[in-house]
Amino acid sequence: MSLRFIGYASLLAMGLIAPFVAYPIFLMHALCFALLACAFNLLLGYTGLLSFGHAAFFGAGAYVTGYAVKIIGLPPGIGILAGTAAAVALGSVFGVLVIRRQGIYFAMITLALAQLVYFFFLQSSFTGGEDGIQGIPRGHLLWLINLEDDRKLYYVVLAIFLFGFVLIHRTIHSPFRPGAESDSRERTQGLVSGI
């Protein structure tokens, strides 16, 4: 057994017992922001691209999910899928606009687009403005899991976090990954050597 396996198993065990020790709502927020940080690390740490657009995807997904569940009346699972689809669509639009940019230009365009999304949701009537969408019902996930129970909702959030973490881990350790690192390394070496 490797040390890495023991570390991951320990973290998983702590994640499973955490809602019995700490406040589950706080832990869910921590897992959501941890997944956001993992995505940010993937983009900045492994590709060298500083993006300020992550909050726009996060917020758009949250607003679409909340609107779909509360106003339209969709079940939470379908609402989460709708929010994910909205975030993917927004990411695709951002990607088309910034795909050929690097450095400060990439960062500034993603910042401008994120602010555009922020002000759109802030001024839109369907989002509730600065108050946001209040009283979103939790309902049942797949008509089986009662999300009104904080601990059950925590385990759903933990499962989504683990899926995202494994996906990012697999992306980093995939066969196409070393090419991205060597390109970044070559650019850095070229800058250092004055080329």
Image (cartoon, rainbow, N blue to C red):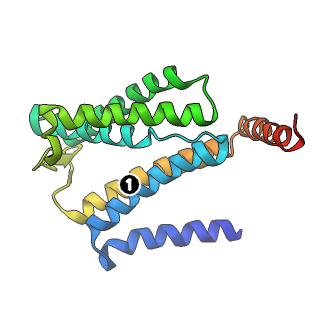
Residue drawn at (53%, 25%), measured in percent from left and top?
Answer: 98
Q: Name the residue carrying label 1.
A: 32
Look at the image and tell me in which quarter the N terminus lies: bottom right
Tell me if I can see residue 1 in this picture.
no
Residue 62 higher or lower than 32, as above or below: above
* Dot 1: element: helix
Residue drawn at (65%, 42%), measured in percent from left and top?
Answer: 48
Residue 172 x %, y %: 65, 45
Return the residue found at the far top. Answer: 96
Return the residue found at the far bottom. Answer: 21
Viewer-nearest residue: 93 or 19: 93
Residue 5 higher or lower than 177, as above or below: below
Residue 165 x %, y %: 51, 51
Three-letter code, disc 1: Cys
Residue drawn at (47%, 48%), measured in percent from left and top?
Answer: 163
Viewer-nearest residue: 138 or 181: 181
In screen coordinates, is 153 left or right of 137?
Answer: right
In screen coordinates, is 117 left or right of 75?
Answer: right
Residue 41 x %, y %: 57, 50
Residue drawn at (87%, 38%), measured in percent from left and top?
Answer: 194
Residue 117 higher or lower than 29, as above or below: above
Quadrant location of residue 90?
top left
Quadrant location of residue 99?
top right
Residue 31 x %, y %: 40, 59
- How many tags in the picture? 1
Tell me if I can see residue 88 in this picture.
yes
In screen coordinates, is 20 left or right of 89?
Answer: left
Look at the image and tell me in which quarter the C terminus lies: top right
Viewer-nearest residue: 71 or 37: 37
Quadrant location of residue 62?
top left
In screen coordinates, is 72 left or right of 32?
Answer: left
